[in-house]
Amino acid sequence: MMKYSYFPGCSANTTGVSFTRSTEYVADKIGFEMLEIPDWNCCGTSAAALTSPELAVALPARSMAISEREFPELDVVAPCAGCYRSLKTSLVYARESEDNLAHVRELIDMPYEAKADVVSLLEAFVSDDVREAISKKVARKLRCLKVACYYGCAMVRPVDVCEFDDEEDPTSMDDLMELIGAEPVDWAYKTECCGAAQQMAVPKQAKPMIERIFENAQANGADCIVTSCPLCMLNLDMREAEINAARVAAGKEPFDIPCYYFTELIGLAFGAEPAEVGIDIHFHPAERLLLQRELDALEAEEADMAARAEEERKKAELAAKIAAKKAEKAAKAAAEAKAAAAASAADGEEVAR
């Protein structure tokens, strides 16, 4: 499916602007159409659920009802993992019973049938038709770039609501990264919480959650972390400097692990410049690694070309030796035949005399 109703979410033009910029770039290149829901409102995320269960249901349902009215044939795509979970949770509640659906209608004071599904952008991008469209637009594969695909917790849990990929070892983003030439690493923190919602409330407990993610990614050989959640991205990207300062003070080596949205890397593989997809506005410097890996890829390609040339040279040399042997054998056979003919002729002359 290449056409969706679009729920941008509150971070789309603020903290998650790189996600929006890169998503729009990629969507335009592959013909992935997103029709923005008019007059959409904040989904409430975790704050609404803590305030009021009814508010947590009503906020997403209102936007879903508008989408249902304006784009009745389309499912809703929500790039932000938090928005995705909020909309999906509200939808699941509305679909559980007629009483629930009636309650939702009463809360939002709008007609609503809860017919359209909700998918994350990552979920939409791993569909067969979108994958095919992506593969056709890859202009430069991101060879030599080792990525730790970080799904976070909002994309996969609660399991009975999200029903996305695998709650412990998802592979959707890994598959997309392989499609553009990057190398996903096998690591243990794919779906661990980064503690983003707790950084202000209990920073002493929350900051080690970030550090463990960087540590595990580094220990498993990753150059960078790739995510699909604006809150995870903000938390990791913005706080890496703070984590590094604490590590240096404790006598530890600082991290140098940039974070990217999966759409940013797809855009790069399509041929975009870093600024076109928002990489230039990251907190932690994110362009140097890409330039280094691009150089590494060129050197690897040159080495491959040299190896292929050497292989062709050896094949040609071997073919020449085989041809020479064949020619030698043929010449020997011809000489023997000539000698035999001469001997036979000599015998004939002797008999005649």
Image: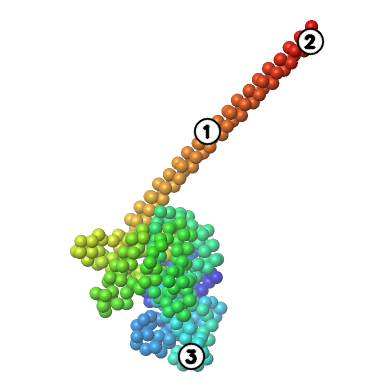
Label 2: few (<14), some (14–19) or many (≥20) C-alpha neighbours in 10 Å: few
Please report the residue visible at 25 percent of the width from the left and 59 percent of the height from the top.
253
Mark 3 against mark 1, which lies toward the viewer? 1
Image quarter for residue 351?
A: top right
Mark 3 against mark 2, which lies toward the viewer? 2
Q: Quick one: 316 or 112, which is closer to the camera? A: 316
Res 100 label: 3
For disc 1, the marked residue is 317
* The N terminus lies in quadrant: bottom right
* Residue furthest to the right: 352
Label 3: few (<14), some (14–19) or many (≥20) C-alpha neighbours in 10 Å: some
Image quarter for residue 46?
A: bottom left
Relative image position of residue 157 (x, y in whole percent): 42, 77
Specify the color scheme: rainbow
Helix, strand or loop status at disc 1? helix
Marks 3 and 1, how far apart at CA:
78 Å
Mark sitting earlier along the chain (3/2):
3
